[in-house]
Image (spheres, helix red, strand yellow):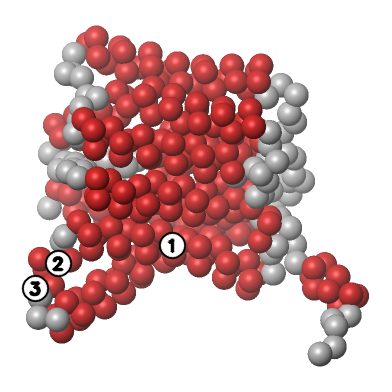
């Protein structure tokens, strides 16, 4: 077997670009909105056929916790397909999402701390929004974890998997691409909004947006999506752990003027802590920089926001019908 010519190898590497543009951000967001829906539909059809062939009741089995967990895992994994296939087709280096493990052990510790602070600091504010949605007649989904088996299952499908794949897409691909057009603050805000709209529901709108702001800041400050994955995982895992140990709604306080004031103070405290970390802990780290281009915003970005808005409105109307 002949060895590949080194010059040919170098040419292939050179053909790939190691950056994303805002055009990529729009395309990736559109695909990320559609891919989970298509995968979920496929899982439903195949699952129904298999259950019916086995003599079971598809309606009962499909509504079971285990089937829903499998569906959640597979729809999350579709983001991996978006990442790999898009990069392959568009000739983008897979490392363009900034896999950088060499960020220092202190940054790993800080990432875990931010995950904990974000959860407890924003929990009460989110609880108030939940009460608002209930007042408006929105039926909220309450997570119930009754045994360790379910806890382990949810940890894999709702903590580990999303922390990896969603950060690759939203902080690795989309945020990086937006920075080619917008300044850092606008890029973080837009990517956080996309992250929130991706969840497609009123209940999961506020918290993903606030968390997305924090995750975007961490990505730009460290130049790596690894600490973002750690914050994301820590946040989701602690939510599951507390639900398992204390039951759903255990951290909620009665809605009073004091609880409202407390919620606002705690939420502000989260961002104050993040600012202090930025000011004193990361002061020797420079933000990653990109060259921004002038001109009109990508058509695909407009389309992606329009599509995500339509999906969100459809789900919102469905709650009241």
Disc ID at residue 231: none
Q: Residues within 10 Å of mark 2 (few under 14, many from 20)?
A: some
| Residue at x 14%, y 67% (from the top left corner) | 61
- Whole-Å distance between the Cαs marked 2 and 3? 6 Å
Q: Residues within 10 Å of mark 3 (few under 14, many from 20)?
A: few
* Mark 1 residue element: helix
Query: Residue 248 occupies which quadrant of the picture?
Result: top left
Query: Residue 240 occupies which quadrant of the picture?
Result: top left
Q: Position of residue 274 (x, y in %)?
A: 54, 22
| Number of marks drawn | 3
- Whole-Å distance between the Cαs marked 2 and 1? 22 Å
Which residue is disc 2 drawn over?
A: 61
Q: Position of residue 267 (x, y in %)?
A: 40, 20
* Mark 2 residue element: helix
Disc ID at residue 77: 1
Q: Is residue 48 visible from the viewing direction of this image? A: yes
Determine whether 101 is above or below 265 in the image.
Answer: below
Determine whether 31 is above or below 145 in the image.
Answer: below
| Residue at x 21%, y 51% (from the top left corner) | 317
Return the disc, 3 or 1, that comes first in the chain's sequence.
3
| Residue at x 85%, y 88% (from the top left corner) | 2
Question: Is residue 275 toward the left or the right of residue 268 in the image?
Answer: right
- CB atoms of marks 2 and 3 within 8 Å: yes
| Residue at x 30%, y 29% (from the top left corner) | 126
- CB atoms of marks 2 and 1 within 8 Å: no
Query: Residue 73 occupies which quadrant of the picture?
Result: bottom left
Return the disc, 2 or 1, that comes first in the chain's sequence.
2
Which residue is disc 3 drawn over?
A: 57
Q: Is residue 213 visible from the viewing direction of this image? A: no
Determine whether 141 is above or below 49 in the image.
Answer: above
Q: In front here: 21 or 151?
A: 151
């Amino acid at each position: 077997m002949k060895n590949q010519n080194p010059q040919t190898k170098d040419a292939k590497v050179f053909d790939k670009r190691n950056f994303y543009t805002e055009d990529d951000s729009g395309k990736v967001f559109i695909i990320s909105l559609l891919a989970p829906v298509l995968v979920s539909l496929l899982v439903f059809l195949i699952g129904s056929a298999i259950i019916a062939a086995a003599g079971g009741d598809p309606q009962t089995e499909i509504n079971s916790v285990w089937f829903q967990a499998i569906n959640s895992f597979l729809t999350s994994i579709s983001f991996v397909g978006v990442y790999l296939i898009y990069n392959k087709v568009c000739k983008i280096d897979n490392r363009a999402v900034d896999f950088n493990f060499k960020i220092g052990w202190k940054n790993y510790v800080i990432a875990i701390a931010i995950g904990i602070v974000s959860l407890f600091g924003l929990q009460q504010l989110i609880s108030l929004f939940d009460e608002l949605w209930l007042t408006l007649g929105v039926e909220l989904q309450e997570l119930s974890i009754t045994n360790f088996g379910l806890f382990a299952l949810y940890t894999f499908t709702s903590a580990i998997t999303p922390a990896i794949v969603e950060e690759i897409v939203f902080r690795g691909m989309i945020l990086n691409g937006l920075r080619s057009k917008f300044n850092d603050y606008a890029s973080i805000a837009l990517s956080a909004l996309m992250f929130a709209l991706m969840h497609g529901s009123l209940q999961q709108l506020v918290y993903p947006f606030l968390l997305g702001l924090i995750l975007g800041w961490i990505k730009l400050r460290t130049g790596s999506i690894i600490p973002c994955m750690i914050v994301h995982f820590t946040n989701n895992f602690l939510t599951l752990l507390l639900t398992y140990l204390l039951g759903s709604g255990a951290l909620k306080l009665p809605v009073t003027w004091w609880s409202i004031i407390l919620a606002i103070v705690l939420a502000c405290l989260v961002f104050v802590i993040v600012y202090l970390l930025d000011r004193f802990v990361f002061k020797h780290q420079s933000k990653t920089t990109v060259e921004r281009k002038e001109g009109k915003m990508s058509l695909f970005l407009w389309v992606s926001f329009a599509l995500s808005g339509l999906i969100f409105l459809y789900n919102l109307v469905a709650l009241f019908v």
